[in-house]
Image (cartoon, rainbow, N blue to C red):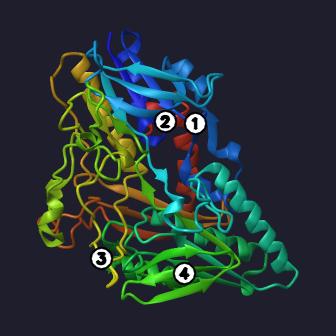
Amino acid sequence: MARVVIMGGGVSGHTAASFLAKWLGKDHEVVVVTPNSLWNWIPSNIFVGVGEMTKEDVTFALAPVYKKAGIDYRQAKAISVHPEGKEGSDAAFITIEYTGQDKEGQSEELTYDYLINATGPKLNFDATPGLGDGKGGLGEHTVSVCTADHAIHAAHELKAVIEEMKAGAEKKFLIGLGHGMCTCQGAAFEYIFNVEHELKKHGVRDKATITYITNEYELGDFGVGGMHIKAGGYVTSGKVFAESLYVERGVRWIKRVHVNKVEADKVHFERLDGTMGEETYDFAMLIPPFAGAGLTAVAKDGSDMSSTIFAPNTMMKVDADYESGARGFENWSPKDWPSTLQNPTYDNMFAVGIAFAPPHFISKPMSSPNGTAINPTPPRTGMPSAMMGKAVAASIRDMINGVADKPTHTANMAEMGAACVASAGKSFLNGSAVSMTMYPVVPDFDKYEFGRDLNGTFGTIGLAGHWVKILLHHGFLWKAKLKPGWTLIPE
């Protein structure tokens, strides 16, 4: 009997665990280690953050779902990886520390035959002074929609500001990225339009100044180097497409900046040209930068071998070309990106989603004359993350069943597409959405004139996309709960 341990129960980890449990049955063990008791459909946190959904609408308890599926669930945090075992034993294991299940604070060594790192990101609020509380959590000046609880807090603060506006007050809203190395521009992009929609709904839009602040060189970069899209039968740049959305809704923007300090009523930032600026606000939602989960790796003799397993950002090394960064932006290639997501040192370890270390940026790396890096980092969430989880699960299944002694399935971001639907409003009759697809995620300028296949890269605006967003919400929650027919819903 083989044991597969999955560190993390988010989109990629949950996908991997679900398929492995289905494919392997009771002949093998599937264990999920995650500090969270609830599964969260993160894209819909945006709706929670404006009061259109509740926490219960976007989360569900993992324990009963995993029990029904035959998955061993440990509500715990992974601390360290021991791929060589320890003195007296060759059995690979991880150390975990329980955060629930009546075992809080207890530690355990959990052996594995195969390990999937799907820990997701650490929300690195403290990377920007004032954005965090100095203890790793969200600070008191701004709000966030990165978790369901954060989103509840955001909705509460937004409601309070709207009530003041109804009494005649004018307010300034600042929404965007809270650091020069942030990813997840899409969440800020969607949230700002939902806030604008709410202000209109409450009849106070005329009393609001709304500003988007970002580390992107141009709007519409999204950490993928921007894109050209098909829209209305024409080919246009993502920059023009995105700017038109902001202009139509009267939203200002500040781009090419690194937020370096957050205060109670203003943010300080550094521009790409090295000059400094500040922006005042009454309500601010700023996405933090991401970091690895902070795992360490330990050799058999007890020495630290983290640099062998993890990149400096503590994300796991996989089958990527990590020397490609030294060749410079103009010489990078889609071939640098990982396919099997297998660790090059230990072939029974894999990493998926945010947990794997990318070989280089997709957007051009830039820095100010002061040496401050100001450019988005590569996104690896959502649809691509789920596809990675399923591909790695299929490879491990085949390796356990003796079909092959190496990975049989791939999930390369240079060979996969992604779809994004950014929707404002929740009602079927009163809402709008920006629907975008791209193929591939990592551009290939040798193969495509604009880096991507224009037949698979397009953008539209309208009510139909909004309906799709609502259907995706219900469809993916159905799938995540492993309800009848869940495997028929694509990743």
2 or 3: mark nearer the eye: 3
- Residue at image coords 84%, 77%: 164
Which numbered disc covers residue 1? none
Instruction: Residue under label 4, please give it.
Output: 268
Name the residue tied to disc 3: 366
Determine the image quadrant of residue 92. top left
N-terminal of the two: label 4 or label 3? 4
- CA gap between label 1 and label 4 equals 34 Å
Residue 470, above or below 307 = below
- Which residue is under mark 1? 36
Q: Label 1's element?
A: loop
How far separated are the C-alphas under marks 3 and 1? 36 Å
Task: Pick whichever, 150 or 140, lies toward us.
Answer: 140
Tell me if label 1 and label 2 are in contact, CB under 8 Å: yes
Q: Residue at the spot x=58%, y=66% of the render?
A: 131
Q: Is residue 394 above or below residue 196?
A: above
Quadrant containing the C terminus is top left
Q: Is residue 191 visible to the viewer in this orientation of the structure?
A: yes
> Given the image, on which type of amino acid does mark 3 rest?
Met
Left or right: 276, with 384 as reference point: right
Q: Which residue is mark 2?
A: 9
Q: How far apart in space, not on screen, are marks 4 and 3 (Cα)?
A: 19 Å
- 228 and 396: which is toward the camera: 396
What's the residue type where badge 2 is placed?
Gly
Q: How far is mark 1 from mark 2, CA to CA?
A: 8 Å
What is the x, y in percent for residue 458?
36, 68
Secondary structure under the numbered disc 3 in the rendered image: loop
Q: Earlier in the sequence, mark 1 or mark 4?
A: 1
